[in-house]
Amino acid sequence: MQPAPDEPRRPRRTWGAKFADAFRGLKFGMRGQSSFAAHIFMGASALVAAAILRCSLEQWALVIFAIGLVFTAELLNTAIEILFRGLEAETRERSWQCLDIAAAAVLVASLAAAAIGIIVFGERIYEMIRDSSGP
């Protein structure tokens, strides 16, 4: 998108500045969010379970994808909540449903992650039981 002719051009940002902004956003998204703390705990638990169960490379990829999916949904939900708080009362009254939709996105991502966990860890547990029972 080109700026209007009378608008001053914004200087190009370096990759370092872009990453710094992203990490600052991650800090803002995580700080003070009790639900994000719960997701971090569950994500760490899933990583520990994947290590204990000696998951394959593909299973690790699925577990990490699921964790990333939930974190991304939670960060977007938090961004929408913060934006919503800055709206005027009249605008908030007309658009409160966006908060519920964003929360639903976190719920869907969490349920998908739980399903991935059940499939991956269930398969590993089944394989371990089958292998330990002998021929």
Image: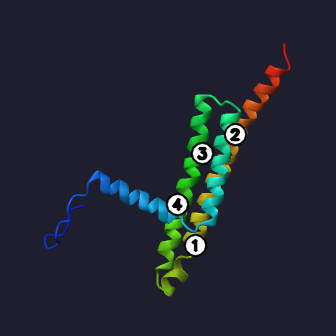
Please name the residue that numbered disc 2 is placed on.
Answer: 49
Instruction: Determine the CA span between mark 3 and mark 4.
Output: 14 Å
Secondary structure under badge 3? helix
Q: Nearer the viewer, residue 67 or 54?
A: 54
Disc 2 or 3, which lies upstream in sequence?
2
Q: Which of the numbered marks, if any, corresponds to residue 11?
A: none
Q: In the rendered image of this protein, does residue 87 appear above or below residue 14?
A: below
- Number of marks in picture: 4
Please indicate whether residue 27 sits to the left or right of residue 104 in the image: left
Instruction: Determine the CA span between mark 2 and mark 3.
Output: 14 Å
Which amino acid type is marked by label 1?
Answer: Gln
The spot of residue 118 in percent (x, y) is 73, 41
Instruction: Determine the CA span between mark 1 and mark 2.
Output: 37 Å
The spot of residue 55 in percent (x, y) is 65, 31
Residue drawn 52% across the image and 60% down it: 75
Please name the residue that numbered disc 1 is placed on.
Answer: 97
Q: Are marks 2 and 4 in contact (CB under 8 Å)?
A: no
Q: In the rendered image of this protein, does residue 48 appear above or below residue 98?
A: above
Residue drawn 13% across the image and 70% down it: 5
Residue drawn 77% across the image and 26% down it: 128
Query: Which of label 4 and label 1 is nearer to you?
Result: 4
Which amino acid type is marked by label 2?
Answer: Ala
Query: Which of label 2 and label 4 is nearer to you?
Result: 2
Q: Are marks 4 and 1 in contact (CB under 8 Å)?
A: no
Instruction: Determine the CA span between mark 2 and mark 4.
Output: 24 Å
Q: Nearer the viewer, residue 25 or 110?
A: 25
Q: How is the image coloured?
A: rainbow
Secondary structure under badge 2? helix
